[in-house]
Image (cartoon, rainbow, N blue to C red):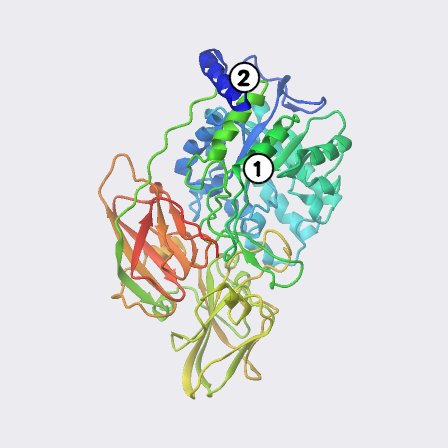
Amino acid sequence: MGRNVLAFHLLLVLAACAADLPTVYEYYTGDGITSGLGVDQPHFTLNGKEIFIYSGGMHYFRVPPQHWRDRLRKLRAAGLNTVETYVAWNIHEPKSGVYEFGESGTELQDFGNIGQFLSIAQEEDLLVILRPGPFICAEWEWGGFPSWLLRENMRVRTSDETYMKYVERYFNQLLPVLAEYQFTNGGPVIAFQVENEYGYADGDKVYLQQLVDLMRNNGIVELLVTSDGASSGTRGSLPGVLFQTVNFGSDPTASFGVLEQLQPGQPLMCMEFYPGWFDHWSEGHHTTDTSVFRSNYEATVSYPGSVNLYMFHGGTNWGFLNGANNGPGDNSAFQPTTTSYDYDAPLSEAGDYTPKYDILRELVAQYNPVKTLTPDPPELVEREVYPTLALDGQLIFNDILARSNDPVTSDTTLSMEQLPINDDSGQSYGYITYRQENIDIAAGTTLTITGHVRDTVMILINGVLISNRLTNSDDFNDFGYWRMENSTITLTTEDLTGATLDIVIENFGRVNYGNLYQQFKGLTQDNRVYLNDQELTSWVIYPMQFHKDWINGITDWNPVDLDYGPAFYKATLTLEESEDGYRDTFIDMSAWNKGVVIVNGFVLGRHVFLGPQQTLYLPGPFLQAGDNEIIIFEQFQPAAEVKFSKDAIFSNP
């Protein structure tokens, strides 16, 4: 028989025997728990029984909490026995000393309830691998670091004393929460990863040992692991202290061969197996052929090796929380990641099954030597295409700034992070405006910003945008974007007296891969502003953070006039009361230019017409009975309406 026929018969046999099969927890804990994950033989053991780890990555902070159970149930129904997640520091300590584990009332409170996520995972018959960093990379804003760390001079990801002071303070809050959910305590967590791909970083062994000590001193008793590319050797680990895993998307023989040399006679595991990849704005949409996925995944599990799919379900980089890539030096090689983190994964951003899901389910059933009860995949809930909405309100840029409740005056420019706001934690995300008032600008005057901007710039005079709109990706080489050094623009062709000059800068995402040490946003220490040869001083600085309470407090909207230039535009989706809640949808932003979308005060994500992402995933739980305000901050050219789509739309620039 052919392989597909054999697999089909295997699934029939499993279905026939399903009623007699134990759950994962019945199999591994039915006789009590005496030990955790063991690595002292060529295969893993859990509580003394052989286990191959078939895991899928799903980050709780990238998935609507109301959908956690649905996504975890689909993960288990694929035959996987484990879910892996990073832990994002900037979710759990958004302001210095303010911790969020689901009940502190911060902007992302619900996403911070990691204990609930772990409980649901166990209820859905899943084990858990946790990767608490403190650095996580993950295409997430600054690799998970909170931006307020930038307020002090430190070298992150090292044993630097200042950095470790804050790591220790954070871990002393986080780890006791996680310790309650350890497998040997009756919970789901079987392993903790220390740092992340540290073999590509400084290789500071003192730092790694400090993290190990912090974990052990906070009650973490489960297996501690590292993950790196095979070429890193032991640079990112502590042999004999930390169990090593490898990351790859193809050729498992080569990577597992290295791991066998590093840890002879011990289990083999790929911590990051890549079924797809992520996207950057203005670049191509990444997909991986299903036949390639099948071949590489089957080669991995048949080796035999344990494996974690990075990602099983990618989810969404909500709001301003996308990361970026960069080179080793200045900001010129900046590549911001899209809001969608679909990853061409087995489960799509909106929770749909893809052909890779079926392949995964088939191969795990075929190769897992331990047979446990695998539930049927849950039925999908169809998405809704809500009615197209006319715009019903507008705020021009000056009106937006007039509602600011925390402008800062300063002789010199200050970066976002240096602003004395948010309990001295600075500004983390959004936009920032540097204003000069009552100045005279002669015809032909040139404005110069030294260095590379971080990250995009708009120039307004008397509330009118005079810098160019975004028309194509070549514009990234010109004024207003990060690639040009010492960029200049001519401000006016006529003399202006008593003018107001605004420099509006966007944080397009702090780097998670590349140079992590120059991540200030706005006008930084590398930037000076000149009118001709005169440096400008004495600024009024407006942080544009788009906090939920501030957004929801806007009530005095003006009639719509589709002006060119930055403004808020509002549309209202009115829904009747529904006991069943509201269905997911996508907002189609292909007719707009660039900015962000806000739904009921929650910053959903960014839109950039260059793509590849053209739609924004809007989960049904984010909607409510009655009026739902959809606010679009458009930087350049608005559309006349807000449209919805049943499916995600991607383009290839």
Q: Is residue 399 left or right of residue 438?
A: left
Question: Taking 545 as reference, is 302 above or below it?
Answer: above
Question: Taking 226 as reference, is 282 above or below it?
Answer: below
The three-letter code of the residue at mark 2 reads Lys
**Residue 57 position by quadrant:** top right
Task: Decide which of 407, 193 is in the foreground and name it.
Answer: 193
Instruction: Examine the rendering and report whether any part of residue 287 can be seen.
Output: yes
State the count of labels.
Answer: 2
Task: Decide which of 576, 427 is in the foreground and name it.
Answer: 576
The three-letter code of the residue at mark 1 reads Val
Q: Residue at the location (47% across, 12% down)?
A: 17
Instruction: Examine the rendering and report whether any part of residue 176 can be seen.
Output: no
Name the mark on residue 55: none
Question: Between marks 1 and 2, how big is the CA–CA gap?
Answer: 27 Å
Secondary-structure class at tag 2: loop
Question: Taking 315 as reference, is 51 above or below it?
Answer: above
Q: Residue at the location (66% across, 52% down)?
A: 162
Q: Can you give x and y, in whole percent of width and height, for residue 409 in the image?
A: 48, 71
Residue pointed to by mark 2: 371
Question: Residue furthest toward the left?
Answer: 576
